[in-house]
Image: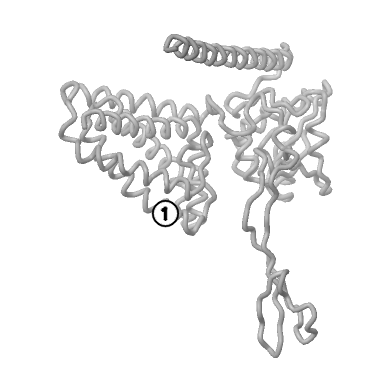
Amino acid sequence: MSILRITSRILLGIVFVFSGFVKAVDPLGSAYKFIDYFVAFRLEFLEPVAFPLAVFLIAAEFIIGISLLTGFKIEMGTWGVMFFMLVFTPLTFILAIFNPVEDCGCFGDAIVLTNWQTFYKNLVLMVFVVFVFISRKKYQIVYTANVEMTILSVVLLVFVAFSIYSYYHLPLIDFRPYNVGTYIPEKMEIPEGAPQDEYKTILIYEKDGIKKEFTIEDYPWQDTTWKFVDQKSYLIKEGYLPAIHDFDIIDSEGYEITDLVLSDENYSFLMVSYNLSDANQKGLNAANEIALYGNQYGYNFYCLTASSSPEIEALSNTMSLNFDFFFTDETTLKTIIRSNPGLVLLKEGIVIGKWHYNDFPEVWEIQKNLLSSLLSNYRKRNEFSGSLNLFLTLFLALCLFEITWKSRNNRLKKK
């Protein structure tokens, strides 16, 4: 029972700390998820509180996990984890039934779960939560109450500061498919033989004023007294969905230029602003300077936005912006970079660099070989990643060989 109490406490602590951390790295992503839920449940008036609510829940989740892991203020931690699970387990059940948003975002972008997977995960965790809660009086106190509360308070303050830093800059760890080093075309590919979407088609026919639904297999094609009215298609099984499946760049004439941008052998700057009306003005001015520099030295500069043409024209005239505007889906733009505006550097479809508007490079930095140094860093990172993978493969092979060899020797000795 003692081992089970410790195991349950540590397991729950790890889950809650991990969940809080991966969302604290990207608090704006959590705020976007809250907004999705507000829209789905017609609570749009709550959108202004999405970010503070996200930070509060992330911090609460993380500190509960720390309490369970360390044993500090363990009774507070057990009450906290019980409250969380009592609220979110039935909530995830409702979300699984009605599916207003595709994934709950409980692990941010680090691990994406469907609503049903999240509900089942919560059911499993609930077993450990109940056991920990029942056993809360049997856990030993580590330090005095004041010492434990002081330590947890310091940890909480540092954690909140880290989360706010990630908001005013870019996430230190980027779990999204557009992270630095990504070769975008590769993540857009569908492997040969990958499963395709499967649909069920319903045909609606009418006879004597009565409408009836048929399938493709049994519709009355030989009976001319039935008249075709309509048809519906339902997705019954999802096929393979590439990591990047909605990255399209459309120019003002309606032509798609995605392949042109991704195949450019030179450096290309993408300024991302899902909503130009809400974009940081200082960031737009800084981007304008970079665009002027790019035009001078032959680097393409594209502004990707989901704003309307009248908004674009009004802002462009007001601020005398010197770059062209292109249209991309709003959700895609929010996924590419957590900044409005944000800056992405591409070369032959590879993401070489990303900047929050608070960190846009100055023109003099670009002139001092910034672009080539970023490319060198990308290559070094690839070389290191390849070496690390090779080392891990060899290490695992050696471990397997040693286990096999010892097993063989043991068998020989027994003989």
Residue 229's place in the image compared with 395, above or below, is below
Q: Position of residue 94 (x, y in %)?
A: 43, 56
Residue lying farthest to the front in this orientation: 415
Residue 247's place in the image compared with 183, above or below, is below
Q: Is residue 317 visible?
A: no
Identified at 48% across, 40% down, the residue is 30
Q: What element carries label 1?
A: helix
Question: In the picture, residue 204 is in which quadrant?
Answer: bottom right
Q: Position of residue 81 (x, y in %)?
A: 30, 39
Identified at 73% across, 28% down, the residue is 269
Asked whether, in this view, residue 49 is left or right of residue 254, the answer is: left
Q: Where is residue 313 in the image (x, y as percent from the top left)?
A: 74, 46
Identified at 23% across, 26% down, the residue is 149
> Which amino acid type is marked by label 1?
Phe
Residue lying farthest to the bottom in this orientation: 208
Camera-side residue of 148 and 209: 209
Asked whether, in this view, residue 298 is left or right of residue 176, the answer is: right
Question: In the picture, residue 222 is in which quadrant?
Answer: bottom right
Q: Identify residue for label 1.
A: 93
Q: How is the rendered protein coloured?
A: one colour
Residue 342's place in the image compared with 87, above or below, is above
Camera-side residue of 16 and 200: 200
Q: Can residue 172 be seen in this view?
A: yes
Camera-side residue of 152 and 216: 216
Residue 87's place in the image compared with 388, above or below, is below
Q: Quadrant of the C terminus?
A: top left
Q: In which quarter of the image is the N terminus?
A: top left
Identified at 53% across, 51% down, the residue is 101
Q: Position of residue 249 (x, y in %)?
A: 76, 41
